[in-house]
Image: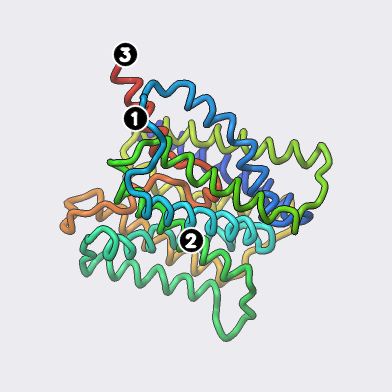
Amino acid sequence: MGSNTKGALLSLLAFGVFATHDVVIKYLGANYAPVQIVFFSVLFGFPLVSFMLIGDSSAQNLRPRHPWWTALRTVSVLISGVCIFYAFSVLPLAQVYVMLFSMPLLITLLSVPILGEQVGLHRGGAVLAGLVGVLIVLQPGTTALTLAHFSALFGAFFGALASVIVRRIGRDERDLVLLMYPMLGNFVVMGAVLPLYYVPMPILDLGAVALMAVLAVVAMRLMIGAYKAGDAAVVAPMQYSQILWASLYGAWFFNESLEKFTWIGAAVIVASGLYIVIRESGHNPDGNMPVLRSRSRIAAGAYFRIGPLMRKARIRASKK
């Protein structure tokens, strides 16, 4: 089996696990507010960070070198997590994914003012086509847009903003700073407002939250393996397989069906995203790679970024 084939298969499996994780979000969202789901999902994620702290031999502190960018990224992750969890709770799974597929397009746009990158005619046209795809899905003026639709779009925007900020400060900040501050922000802010939304959770539902944490860790380890085995240009497009998982899971567990315009819009968005990825992986006349370097999976919400974990894996491998 070739390395790119292995990378593609591992990433397909990873996104299948991530989709299963999102099914659990939708299951819990029927009875609990997004604030409560995010809080407990982060709470169950702290053991992983604890093991990372134990294994970190660096004597540096956890004060960020770019406090304002770190604060903006933390706020962005908080907003993105709540918005995405709410959208999954209310809308059909596949419809949420289609709107979140706009994240690579938004990353490309946000890279211009934040990173000073240039977007050429080809990639600019791809971005516009992708945004048209979003409009096809939403059908403004013909269908009633709900808070959940706007929530998914806000989640995509702030998720893209968080990814671009990491590209700006990622080389200077420690990996644990990038991991810890969004988690601590979620824990403090969601914990502060939790009394307004808290509903007692039986053991079964607490087990579902724990399962979310396990699924997220397993999927991220698979993603690390995928990026180590294959080229980013091969691995990155596999994220669009989530629309297939979402369609299957939505039909099996929630009796959901996709409308014609959702499929048409999804095709336009996926085509534009793939075009950007392919163009970046070729001769890349713009000299930028905002999508391929942003390795957080779509709809990561409150969980960890893949990039820092990959860097730690490479450091360990270089010491062997």
Residue topped by disc 3: 320
Q: Is residue 64 left or right of residue 11?
A: left
Residue visible at 43% across and 35% down?
176
Residue 16, given in percent of the width and then of the height, sits at 56, 42
Residue sticking out furthest to the top: 320
Measured in 3D between alpha carbons, the distance from the residue under mark 3 to the one under mark 1, in whole angstroms, is 21 Å
Quadrant containing the N terminus in the rendered view: top left
| Amino acid at the residue labelled 3 | Lys
Give yes or no for contact between labels 3 and 1 (Cβ–Cβ under 8 Å): no
Q: Secondary structure at mark 3?
A: loop
Residue at the image point whose x is 57% and y is 38% from the top: 216
Point out the tag, 2 or 1, that comes first from the N-terminus.
1
Give the amino acid type for the residue marked by disc 1 in the picture: Ser
Q: Which residue is mark 2?
A: 156
Badge 1 marks a residue whose secondary structure is helix
Q: Amino acid at mark 2?
A: Ala
Circle 1 Cα neighbour tier, 10 Å, few/some/many (<14 / 14–19 / ≥20): some
Q: Mark 1 — residue?
A: 3
Please state the horizontal and vertical placement of residue 154, each as a whole percent of the image. 51, 66
Q: Residue at x 29, y 61 (%)?
A: 114
Q: Is residue 215 above or below residue 75?
A: above
Measure the alpha-carbon separation of dots 2 and 1.
31 Å
Q: Earlier in the sequence, mark 3 or mark 1?
A: 1
Left or right? Give the position of 186 relative to 304.
right
Q: Residues within 10 Å of mark 2 (few under 14, many from 20)?
A: many
Residue 110 on image: x %, y %: 33, 63
Dots 2, 1 in contact, CB < 8 A = no
Q: Nearest to the eye among marks 3 and 1: give it.
A: 3
